[in-house]
Image (tube, coloured by chain):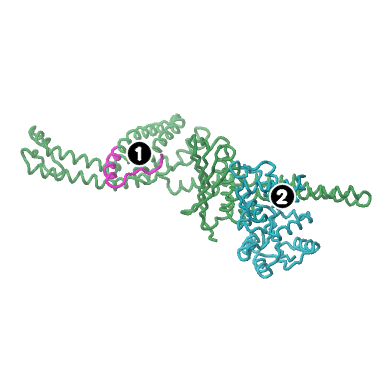
Chain colours: A green, B cyan
């Protein structure tokens, strides 16, 4: 999976690092070509064509670098995040301007220019040392004699080459000793050099404080707009429900009471029937208000918090739902409410689409995050898009920096996991 | 019959007081918050308590908590809980000790004074009075793997009315059958829910509990 760290532990780590260094170094060639393409397209800006050529060239470079970031993240354990500011849709000129104004574009170019040197002294160095060690051994074994016999003049670092074991055993032993030291040093320092390289990549290819903030601002602006939209829509719904429901019934009741007042003397029987109807009407108004309140802020959620509220949801669910709650306190009311409605919607989805026979809900809190997972043994194959409403849930919990993950292989099981960063108020 | 009443809205509290007095109940105490409710329940040991779920100071489920606590200390203390809404979760918690004397009704049921007073009397006598709404939501859920799935439609109807706390005679009247037929149905229900032979009232409570737990 992309972005995940895949580093061996112990001895294996020392052995894998040189090869990773070699592969990273080899990758710098296609990257170099891409950067040349970008440079050329910039050269054409003067005659106008560059404005059309720069955006695709930069985007190509970026996608190559995304792969590179991923690789470095996995091999060094240092997560290199994407630094790019969003590129606007629009005319080539707008895209061009946005791209050259994004510092990440220039940092990419600087990285590509310097990386061959930096990687040679860091990630690639362990492989080079290892190779040099092997070369020393080859010299000591037989290569030295061949070179000297052909009157070659060679130094192994500071040792003048005199021959191999067969003719100059002392010289060859010295050579072999140093070769062993180089080889082992290459292996030994490999992981540390790799880490240095990871830090370098992180600094050059990762987001700067400024672009991190810019990305954060963009995320906040989006989620705020969603939140405002959602609450405005909710208010409209509540207004309409009140207007068509309870309010209308109260008006009708007022009118009936007026009629009853008039009929009281003339037609007591008719008045009595009307009274019964009015009482029925008041009961209906109450019921509607109750449903409305339940939709705004469910009573159990207000009383007991998310744990019991999810249990109450489970009780009303058509499928057997097993709920495990492990919470040392209560999150803030808005977070609770978002989590509750998310679970409620997921459970509704399960009932409607999954064909499941059992559902399990797990609610727990760890590392500053409220984590809720809903698992069902249905047919699976659910996706975030495709009218399941999961996107809507994702947007709504996004307001609280919450994330949603879906795992739903065909054939099941389906697991939906929500994570909401929040503090708990201990009770 | 002595009653402790807990309701924080003065208007509704006065209304309930006069309603109950009109039906020959004696009001031992009428309180408006959770802590004094618990104290009143333990001090007065009333024949029945009528309690609003949501009470000061927290305006959460203060009343319910006080009622549950009082029943822990005085097992079987009859409590009728009133609420603007009914929740299965709360119904289960109330019934969980299996000792009966529990009512859980929507506040609107007060409109029908006759039935409301009936419910109070049933609860005071150790029976149950579950709001039809609780029962309706259970039926709407309609799980097919519960022991209830083994009941015939008729037995299910009887079960619903039993959950509301009706006596066999009342059930017979409602379903327009003889009381003997109802007795037969209830016996079948007890058998199907694996409820051992014990006194009838207790088994009715257990049956309702099984129903809620399905």
Can you tell which quarter of the image residue A171 is in? top left
Q: Quadrant of the N terminus of chain A?
A: top left
Q: Answer with left or right where residue A13 lies relative to residue B197.
A: left
Q: What percent of the width, then of the height, locates residue A245?
A: 74, 46
Say above or below: A5 vs B65: above
**Marks 2, 1 in one chain:** yes
Q: Nearer the viewer, residue B183 or B149?
A: B183
Per the image, the residue denoted by label 2 is A289
- Percent x, y of residue A335: 56, 52
Q: CA distance from mark 2 to mark 1?
A: 65 Å
Asked whether residue A297 appears in the rendered view, the answer is no
Inspect the magenta stretch and tell me whether residue B24 lies in it.
Answer: no
Q: Position of residue A11 (x, y in %)?
A: 27, 46
C-beta proximity under 8 Å, tags 2 and 1 = no
- Badge 1: residue crowd in 10 Å (few <14, some 14–19, many ≥20): many
Name the one closer to the observer, B64 or A64.
Answer: B64
Left or right: residue B141 versus residue B24 is left
| Residue B212 visible in the displayed image | yes
Q: Quadrant of residue A317?
A: top right
Q: Which residue is most to the bottom?
A: B43
Q: Earlier in the sequence, mark 2 or mark 1?
A: 1
**Disc 1: which residue:** A112
Q: Is residue A17 magenta?
A: yes
Q: Position of residue A46 (x, y in %)?
A: 43, 32
Graded by Cα atoms within 10 Å as few (under 14), some (14 to 19) or many (20 or more), the crowding at tag 2 reads some
Mark 1 secondary-structure assignment: helix
Residue B198 picture quarter: bottom right
In the visual, does B107 lie left or right of B141?
right
Tell me, for residue B74, which label it has, or none: none
The boundaries of the magenta stretch are A1-22
């Amino acid at each position: 999976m992309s972005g995940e760290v895949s580093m061996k532990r112990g001895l294996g780590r020392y052995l894998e690092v040189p090869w990773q260094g070699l592969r990273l170094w080899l990758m710098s060639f296609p990257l170099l070509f891409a950067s040349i393409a970008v440079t050329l397209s910039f050269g054409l800006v003067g005659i106008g064509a560059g404005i059309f050529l720069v955006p695709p060239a930069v985007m190509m470079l970026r996608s190559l670098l995304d792969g590179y970031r991923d690789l470095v993240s996995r091999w060094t354990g240092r997560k290199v995040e994407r630094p790019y500011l969003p590129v606007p849709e629009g005319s080539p000129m707008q895209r061009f301007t946005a791209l050259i104004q994004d510092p990440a574009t220039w940092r990419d170019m600087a990285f590509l220019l310097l990386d061959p040197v930096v990687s040679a002294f860091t990630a690639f160095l362990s492989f080079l040392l290892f190779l040099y060690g092997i070369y020393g051994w080859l010299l000591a074994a037989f290569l030295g004699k061949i070179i000297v016999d052909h009157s070659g003049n060679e130094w192994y670092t500071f040792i003048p080459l005199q021959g191999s074991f067969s003719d100059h055993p002392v010289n060859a032993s010295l050579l072999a000793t140093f070769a062993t030291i180089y080889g082992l040093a290459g292996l030994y320092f490999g992981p540390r050099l790799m880490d240095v390289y990871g830090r370098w990549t992180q600094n050059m290819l990762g987001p700067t404080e400024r672009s991190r903030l810019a990305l954060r601002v963009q995320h906040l602006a989006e989620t705020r707009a969603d939140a405002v939209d959602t609450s405005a829509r909710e208010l409209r719904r509540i207004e309409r429900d009140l207007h068509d429901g309870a309010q209308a019934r109260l008006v009708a009741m007022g009118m009936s009471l007026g009629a009853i007042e008039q009929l009281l003397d003339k037609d007591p029987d008719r008045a009595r029937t009307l009274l019964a109807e009015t009482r029925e009407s008041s009961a209906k108004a109450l019921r509607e208000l109750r449903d409305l309140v339940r939709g705004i802020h469910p009573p159990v959620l207000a009383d007991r918090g998310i744990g019991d509220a999810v249990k109450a949801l489970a009780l009303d669910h058509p499928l057997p739902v097993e709920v495990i709650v492990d919470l040392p306190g209560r999150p803030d009311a808005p977070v609770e409410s978002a989590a509750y409605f998310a679970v409620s919607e997921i459970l509704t989805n399960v009932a409607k689409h999954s064909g499941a026979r059992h559902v399990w809900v797990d609610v727990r809190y760890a590392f500053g995050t409220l984590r809720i997972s809903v698992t069902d043994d249905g047919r699976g194959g659910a996706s975030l898009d495709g009218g399941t409403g999961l996107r809507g849930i994702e947007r709504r919990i996004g307001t609280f920096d919450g994330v949603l993950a879906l795992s739903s292989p065909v054939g099941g099981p389906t697991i939906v996991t929500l994570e909401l960063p929040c503090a708990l108020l201990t009770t | 019959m002595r009653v402790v009443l807990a309701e924080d809205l003065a208007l509704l509290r006065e209304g309930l007081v006069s309603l109950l007095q009109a039906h020959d109940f004696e009001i031992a105490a009428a309180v408006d918050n959770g802590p004094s409710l618990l104290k009143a329940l333990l001090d007065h040991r009333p024949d029945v308590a009528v309690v609003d779920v949501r009470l000061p100071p927290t305006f959460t489920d203060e009343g319910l908590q006080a009622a549950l606590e009082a029943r822990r200390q005085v097992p079987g203390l009859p409590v009728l809980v009133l609420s603007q809404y009914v929740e299965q979760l709360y119904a289960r918690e109330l019934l969980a000790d299996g000792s009966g004397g529990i009512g859980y009704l929507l506040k609107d049921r007060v409109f029908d004074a006759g039935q409301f007073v009936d419910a109070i009397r049933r609860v005071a006598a150790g029976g149950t009075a579950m709001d039809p709404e609780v029962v309706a939501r259970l039926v709407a859920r309609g799980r097919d793997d519960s022991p209830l799935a083994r009941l015939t439609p008729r037995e299910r109807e009887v079960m619903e009315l039993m959950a509301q706390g009706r006596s066999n005679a009342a059930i017979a009247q409602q379903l327009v059958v003889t009381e003997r037929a109802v007795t037969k149905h209830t016996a079948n229900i007890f058998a199907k829910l694996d409820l051992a032979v014990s006194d009838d009232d207790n088994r009715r409570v257990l049956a309702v509990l099984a129903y809620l737990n399905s």
